[in-house]
Each structure stands twice: as structure tokens, then as C-alpha cells.
Amino acid sequence: MPTKKTKKEFTLEWSLLCSHSLTDADTMNASLINLIDQININANRKDKSKEFNEKEGEVFPINMVLVSRFRKLIDENTIVSVDVRYDVLDPKMKKLGSFESSFTMEKGIKNFRAASHVNGFKITTSGMYAIVVNTKKLNDTKYTKVGSVPLDVNLKVT
């Protein structure tokens, strides 16, 4: 017997990294300040006996905001609850970590911006990193990849 295909309730419009995100209380417009697509890290080794371990990597205190815009695809008077998982992948596609958030698009809401603050970022080597955006409806068990944010990292170990 064929399975019934359920209608998609929401979609990811875009995701990006920036230094700060501000929302105007009157208009609800967002100001995304200093978009980030590349970072330079100078890993200064004060203790010269401690080498940088590329296999394990190291967490650097990098402050960024990951902003994602979602759009409701069904009747705007329907409540939609969404779980989001962000997976951080290094240039070799090794998963370095994940962080999660949840939100609800209430009745009358067609679009939703989610901002997640990143206060530390694990680096293993120079190259193109990816923050993969995965979503699922609140009671689903399986996440689906819906997007990816590239981040070019230049690591200099001295």
C-alpha cells in the first residue's frame, strides 16, 4: 500500500553568519552586522612544548551569530513547531559538534528568523568549514538537511 505523503509545513529561506543581529521593535526588520564568510585565527603558542593537535582540534573564542529565516508553507493560522540542529563540519567533513534550538511559528506568523549565538568554534585545520542546517517537525524523530553555511577558516599556528 502506498504511503501518504505529508505536506511540507515550512522551509528554510536562508542562513548566514554575522557579528551581530539587531531587530527593530517597530518594523521587525533585522539588521545583520558584519556578515562573516571568512575568519583568520592566529593560534599563538605561549607554551611552545604544547603543539596544535590537528586531529583533535581546539576551540577558539569566536563570537558569531547564526541567523536563519524560515517560511511557513501552510495556512498561516496553523501553529508550526520546528527543531533545528546545526552540525559543524571541518574541511575533511569530520563532524566537530552540534548545537540545537527550537521555535514555534504561532498563528498569523508567516516568517520566522532564528538567531543562535556561537561563542566558541572548534578548528582542526585551515579550509572551508560547513555549518549544516537540519530541521524536523517537533514530534518527528529524523532530521533532514535543508541548508549549509560555508565558513572559510585561515589558521596560523605560531
Image (cartoon, rainbow, N blue to C red):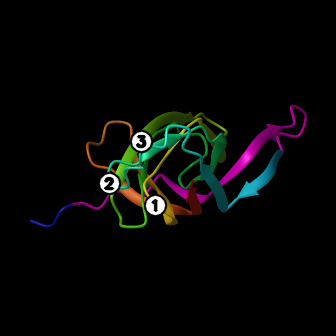
- Tell which of 125 and 102 is nearer to you: 125
Task: Indicate yes or no whether the magenta region holds residue 47.
Answer: no
Residue drawn where x is 59% and y is 35% of the image:
119
Tell me where residue 112 appears, x and y as whole percent: 64, 44
Q: Amino acid at mark 2?
A: Lys
Disc 1/disc 3 C-alpha distance (Å) = 16 Å
Name the residue tied to disc 2: 55
- Which sits earlier in the primary sequence, circle 3 or circle 2? 3
Give the distance between the C-alpha atoms of the residues marked 1 and 2, in whole angstroms.
Answer: 9 Å
- Residue 17 falls inside the magenta stretch: yes
Q: Nearer the viewer, mark 3 or mark 2?
A: 3
Amino acid type, callout 3: Lys
Circle 3: element type:
loop
Describe the element under mark 2 as helix, strand or loop: loop
Quadrant showing the N terminus: bottom left
Give the left or right position of residue 20, taking residue 83 as reference: right
Would you say the residues marked 3 and 2 are in contact, meaning their CB atoms lie under 8 Å apart? no
Q: Earlier in the sequence, mark 1 or mark 3?
A: 3
Q: Crowding near pointer 1: few (<14 within 10 Å), some, many (20+)?
A: many
Looking at the rendering, the stretch of residues picked out in magenta corresponds to: 4-29
Q: Give the crowd class for mark 2: few <14, some 14-19, many >=20 residues within 10 Å.
A: few
The three-letter amino acid code for the residue at tag 1 is: Thr
In the rendered structure, the answer to whether residue 56 lies left or right of residue 36 reads left
Q: Secondary structure at mark 1?
A: loop
| 136, 121: nearer the viewer | 121
Residue behind mark 3 = 50
| Mark toward the start of the polypeptide (1 vs 2) | 2
Relative image position of residue 114 (x, y in whole percent):
62, 41
Q: Is residue 7 visible?
A: no
Tell which residue pokes out farthest to the front in this image. Answer: 49
Q: Which mark is residue 125?
A: 1
